Image (spheres, helix red, strand yellow):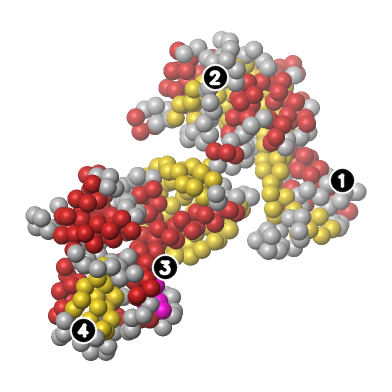
Amino acid sequence: MDGPPNSPVDACISSLNAMDLMDEADSRRAEAARNSGESLPAAAVRIGLIPPSAFTTAALDATGWPLLDADEAATLDKPPATGAPQASFLKSRLAIVAPAPEGLIVALADPFDEGLKRAIEMSSSGPIAYRVAEGSTVIAWRRTVLEGGQRLTAPSTEAASGEAVEAMEALLEQAARLGASDLHFEPSPTGGRARARVDGAMREIGTLTSALYPSAVARAKVLARLDVAERRLPQDGRARLELAGRPIDLRLSTAPALDGETLAIRLLDPEGAPGKLSALGFPDEYETVLRVASKAPHGLFLLTGPTGAGKTTTLHAALSELNASERKIMTVEDPIEYALPGVVQMQVKTDIGFDFASAQRTMLRHNPDIMMVGEIRDTTSAAIAIQAALTGHLVFSTVHANSAAGAAIRLLDLGVEPFLLSAALIGAGAQRLARCVCPDCAVPDAPAPEALSRIGAPKDGAYRRAQGCHSCGQTGAKGRVAVAEAFLVPRSFAEAVRAPSPSETALGDLTGATPLWRAALDLAARGEISLDEAIRVAPQPTA
């Protein structure tokens, strides 16, 4: 407990326990996060374990003090220059000290802060009427009365903590409304900033003071049930909130940085889970290859592309179409981004030795018809994927490579024998996501003919560029479109794979697929993306 037996703070904690709002685990987490002089239940409020209103109700019962609500607080005056703590002192606590006919009204957001009560009593010569107030009431009074209507530019940790929940949830709400894929909190000597990745590009959406930033990160940790007190080691967790009017799954990752902890939050919309391949907006050529590969009785199909290119979304859409009662489908992923009803999905847990390779071995013992391996990362996982493809299983996976043909080169680099690869591989694809020109601020573009000729772009295209506007956040881009290439392995490709030192360019020429750089330039020629974006997302190979 937080005080002597049967003390008011004990009574408060008991009330919270009775309301099923605080258990022993919550008490331990709040204890680890306590600031000097702060009571345990107040710390639990600050880091978001319990609602402020519930704490206020329990504190009223425990202390017997009356409530000071926001309306009454707005009528109170600034404390006198003498006979009460000065404004500089009050900034360090969530407290209201105001003159009244009967002496002083003292309203505390944490009525169990004995040190604060003693300090106020020592500096006051007259009688004191204690009240309980929510932290939001104290902050509102301070801004309008104590600070003359000005927002505090450098609030203390305690004062800022009262705003941490509001700040974090407001930034998450804003990120969700922007359609951001992730939200990043990055510390600095003066606090930190929040940036959202919208359409693949980072955009700053807020800044946090040095007092508010740690509390906001602590709030996120509470949401994901992470260790609030651990700031030296990375932590990962999950949570779910209702944002922008719909439930959003959050994947959180913290890491120690020079000026504090950095936090990355991935926003996943369960309602936005991939459906059919046709809904993803792929070129007809790409979609046709994926559908043909999906109907193969066995073999290996690989996808390549950078992080955030939508590879997992594509594979999930293909599995959704293949999902039927007569097929057993299993996946191993890191992480599992979307739940696929009827599909057995396994999460990699490297800390206990359950990596991709061991998960693949487990899947084979369950004899699935179709397997999806989130990523082939090493020689062992590559060998098992090839073995599965050659023994009657249809295997989908991803590898890191620059092109569809480069997927084969990557497996060869991982030690797969050429004759096994040529027998197992049925096809490969590569994809990128390019930022579309904002339709609200797009204007015609007229690239020089010699420049178009130099990069191999069509000379008679309807090229466009964007100037930036309110609709696109001054970025000139709004929405994204897929740039993709894919092929089914022809006999000539299989033979070339077995040749000594095959090159990515030579293999690509044998596939007959439209290369990524050409597909990107075609999109630019149609005015869907800018020419600069086409060159950025899929530059033409130099060799």
Comes first in the chain, label 1 or label 3? 3
Q: Residue furthest left?
A: 5
Residue matched to label 4: 103
Q: Is residue 341 above or below residue 197?
A: above
Left or right: 369 as drawn, with respect to 433: left
State if disc 2 and disc 4 touch (CB < 8 Å): no
Decide which of 85, 362 is in the foreground and name it: 85
* Residue type indicated by callout 3: Thr
User: What numbered label is drawn on residue 295?
Assistant: none
Mark earlier in primary sequence (2, 1): 2
Quadrant location of the C terminus in the rendered image: top right
Residue at 20% in and 56% down: 12
Q: Disc 4 or disc 2, which is closer to the eye?
A: 4
Under tag 2, what secondary structure?
Answer: strand
Q: CA distance from mark 4 to mark 2?
A: 74 Å
State the image coordinates of residue 292 (x, y, percent, origin top left).
72, 20
Looking at the image, is mark 4 or mark 1 earlier in the sequence? 4
| Residue 209 disc label | 3
Secondary structure beneath dot 3 equals strand
Real-space CA distance between mark 1 and mark 3, rounded to the nearest whole angstrom: 51 Å
Instruction: Give the residue number, with chain letter if any, for mark 2.
Output: 329
Sequence-wise first label, 2 or 3? 3
User: Magenta includes 74?
Assistant: no
